[in-house]
Amino acid sequence: MENLKEHPEIYSLIKKEEERQETTLCMIPSENYCSKAVKEATASVLMNKYAEGYPKKRYYQGNVFIDDVELITIEKAKKLFNAEHANVQSLSGSPANMAVYFALLNLNDKVLAMNLSHGGHLTHGSKVNFSGKLYNFIEYEVEKETEVIDMDKIRKIAELEKPKLILSGFTAYPRKIDFKEFDDIAKSVNAISMADISHIAGLIVSEAHPSPLPFTDVITTTTHKTLRGPRGAIILCKEKFAKDIDKAVFPGLQGGPHENIIAAKAVCFEEALKPEFKDYGKQIVKNAKALAETLMSENIKLVSNGTDTHLILIDLIRTKSIGKEGFGKDVAVALEEAGIVTNANSIPFDTSTPFKPSGVRLGTSALTTRAMKENEMLEIGKYIADIINNLSDLELRQKIRNKVLNLCQNFPIYKND
Ligand code: DSN
């Protein structure tokens, strides 16, 4: 970053952020550390080029190499996910979901999706989001007893409501998703099946979670979570939806695609096609299970009592040492002081507000990228439990901070590559 030194304010903040990432444990389940190759593609001269349109059908000259970049990315996306069609231009997860709705729905059409505080996403029909304002979203939820979705209930809602689209795929749900059953339900009521696999795409391509392909009609995914690529998204679909999806992305919603990011997506897909990525995805789940077991053995209550994925949701209301609603943020702040970066999150049937939620969301994908395994999860699980079970002990946070620093030094992200 020699040239960036001429811009000292930004240079020094980037250096500080680099140091923060190296010296803390990233346990936000939607984050990861991309490879140096992904970073290099992102920072390349492809940044300079306008390429409105699609390969071989551009509105600007000079796209001879850019066309190849995008075509290669499309082919790799199709191969990685076993998809009929891929649009790789979506800027991120929300625009990708927006493009699907714009392509396949009319305003006010009925969509069946998961409630936000039960694990859905803002773009899955939240009232404060364009999705909830423009379309008629009806919701399913997890069961109170098991905190898992009941497919029979979802089928009944679908039969009664006859939605035009049924959406699966979640942002705060620790359990396996039965995409086949979702698709069957959609087919039985003549609805389009859609899966937003943003969180678990890396697990799917590692065969650590069943895939919604090739049977689901439309799939969206971000590329920067468990998939470990650049910040962005893609849309995969059956050939019969391809034209409508492409038209919705451009010219419907977006202008010039970010071809530097598209190249970085190709690098990410190439990395994910390698056999070692399968080991990575499987290790993410092993790590999450080890962490979940440790937390539960230390009397920390987990939503659904465990995990099948990369994600763990702590229920602080039913964790004895807290036992009250609204403590998610306090716990997330305490953990950050100890160098463990998580996020406060609502839990199913949360009695508190989204601004003061009662849960904490954890994930193991970034730590697994650092080559941490089950032993490290046991250690980190104990640190997390100690902090939660002794929330007013400021000295303890500092002691754990030092241990976390040591752990980070032993598992560098970029420094020793
Ligand atoms: N912000 C993402 C997450 O953290 O799950 C979803 O968009």
Image: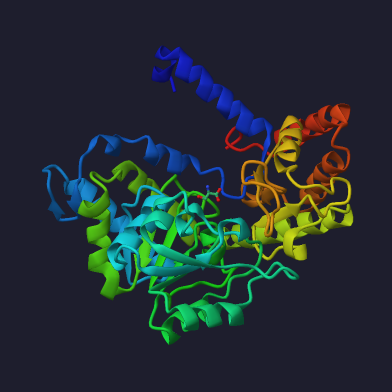
Observer-nearest of 392 and 405: 392
Residue 318 visible from this viewpoint: yes
Quadrant of the image for the N terminus? top left
Left or right of residue 252: residue 148? right
Residue drawn where x is 77% and y is 64% of the image = 305
Residue 200 at x, y = what percent?
55, 60
Observer-nearest of 236 and 348: 348
**Colour mode of the rendering:** rainbow
Residue drawn where x is 75% and y is 70% of the image = 145
Q: How many numbered marks, from 0 up? A: 0
Residue 320 at x, y = what percent?
88, 51
Residue drawn where x is 80% and y is 43% of the image = 384
Residue 284 at x, y = what percent?
65, 57
Q: Is residue 37 above or below residue 110?
A: above
Residue 295 at x, y = what percent?
82, 53
**Which corner quadrant of the image does residue 337 belong to?**
top right
Left or right of residue 117: residue 63? left
Q: Is residue 28 above or below residue 400?
A: below
Q: Is residue 255 above or below residue 47?
A: below
Quadrant of the image for the C terminus? top right
Left or right of residue 225: residue 390? right
Residue 172 visible from this viewpoint: no
**Which corner quadrant of the image does residue 231 belong to?**
top left
Observer-nearest of 328 and 241: 328
Q: Is residue 304 above or below residue 358?
A: below
